[in-house]
Amino acid sequence: MAANVIDIEIQKYLHFLGTEEKKSILHVIKSFVQLRQENASQRVSIEQYNKEIDEALGQFKSGDFLTQQELEKEMEKL
């Protein structure tokens, strides 16, 4: 279903709702928008993503990593 069709459907049903129901729907919509904005701010560019992968591969190749056993020992210390 296209976005504009959904918009029209929502508008058709809004007048059937009371004030409290409309407030609830508004709250849900605001929550969705806030989540979308938070997720958008957390995204990195492809260039940054590739750079981070290259750095991680470099660390691995140079032996700069922990094995699972080493990590488990570290976690036991906490």
Image (tube, rainbow, N blue to C red):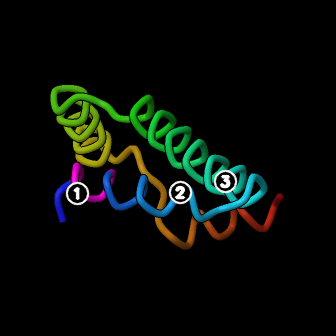
In depth, the one of 75 and 20 nearer the eye is: 20
Is 52 positioned to the left or the right of 18 in the image? left
Q: Sequence order check: which comes first, mark 1 or mark 3?
A: 1
Q: Is residue 1 magenta?
A: no
Residue type at mark 1 is Val
| Residue that mark 1 sits on | 5
In depth, the one of 69 and 16 nearer the eye is: 16
| Residue that mark 2 sits on | 14
| Residue that mark 3 sits on | 22
Query: In x, y percent, where is residue 37?
Result: 47, 33
Query: In x, y percent, where is residue 72?
Result: 64, 70
In depth, the one of 18 and 78 nearer the eye is: 18
Residue 35 lies, with reference to residue 14, above or below; the image says above
**Quarter of the image with the N terminus in it:** bottom left
| Residue contact between numbered discs 3 and 2, judged by CB atoms under 8 Å | yes
Residue type at mark 2 is Leu
Query: In x, y percent, where is residue 4?
Result: 22, 49
